[in-house]
Amino acid sequence: MDTYSPYPADTEWTFRSLQGGHEHATPLLLSWEVNGDPITDDFTPDEITAEELWNRWFSEIGKKGEAKIYWFVMGSGTFEGAPFARHNPIGEDFLTYFSWPLRAGTGERLNFLRLPVRDKLWNEKRGDKGGFIQQHTGWKPSPLQPFLDAETIAKAAGLNGF
């Protein structure tokens, strides 16, 4: 059994609501938000490019060094804070509301570190909140990574004069 690769994106997980007992069956993935990346809420991809958003974000947030990464578990009808994430502004997470997910058909217990990480993009086809970071740099975080070091990413991608 492969215990180090991400689960396939279509892996179905079953879990129960801790309040009503309703059973859910859905693929799950991790979604991420970087401190300051909701700058995209004021724009659409046809109004501003990923590069322009990166430059605005970097000058306000990124040049200060590390930016916090907030994590969420997503599935059909499910969007909750990710358990074991270092930064959780609301203090509650997926396991506050649901039982530990089990793989449909096998009963394997979910390893949250192996959930696939959602791609976030900013282009003519998709305008995801904060998608400018991945779109412009090619970078996305590892599961539950607590910080983004903007200068390191800029240097590695050859951006911002580095």
Image (spheres, rainbow, N blue to C red):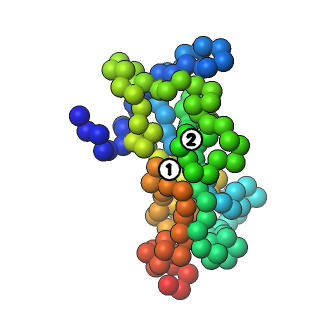
For image coordinates 32% across by 44% down, the residue present is 5
Crowd band around label 2 with a 10 angstrom C-alpha radius: few (<14), some (14–19), many (20+): many
Earlier-in-chain disc, 1 versus 2: 2
| Picture quadrant of residue 42 | bottom right
What numbered label is drawn on residue 19?
none
- Mark-to-mark CA distance, 1 and 2: 8 Å
For image coordinates 33% across by 20% down, the residue present is 106
For residue 129, side relative to residue 157 (left or right): right
Residue 51 makes an appearance in the image: no
For image coordinates 42% across by 32% down, the residue present is 110
Give how far across and how far down residue 138 sits, in percent.
46, 64
Give how far across and how far down residue 147 sits, in percent.
55, 61
Give the vertical position of 56 relative to 127 (above or below).
below
For residue 45, side relative to residue 119 (left or right): right
Contact flag, marks 1 and 2 (Cβ < 8 Å): yes
From the image, tell me which residue sits under label 2: 82
- Seen as rendered, the residue at the extreme left is 1
- Amino acid identity at mark 2: Ala
For residue 101, side relative to residue 51 (left or right): left
For mark 1, give the secondary structure: loop
From the image, tell me which residue sits under label 1: 144
Residue 153 makes an appearance in the image: yes
Residue in the foreground of this view, choosing between 17 and 46: 17
For mark 2, give the secondary structure: loop
- Amino acid identity at mark 1: Leu
| Picture quadrant of residue 82 | top right
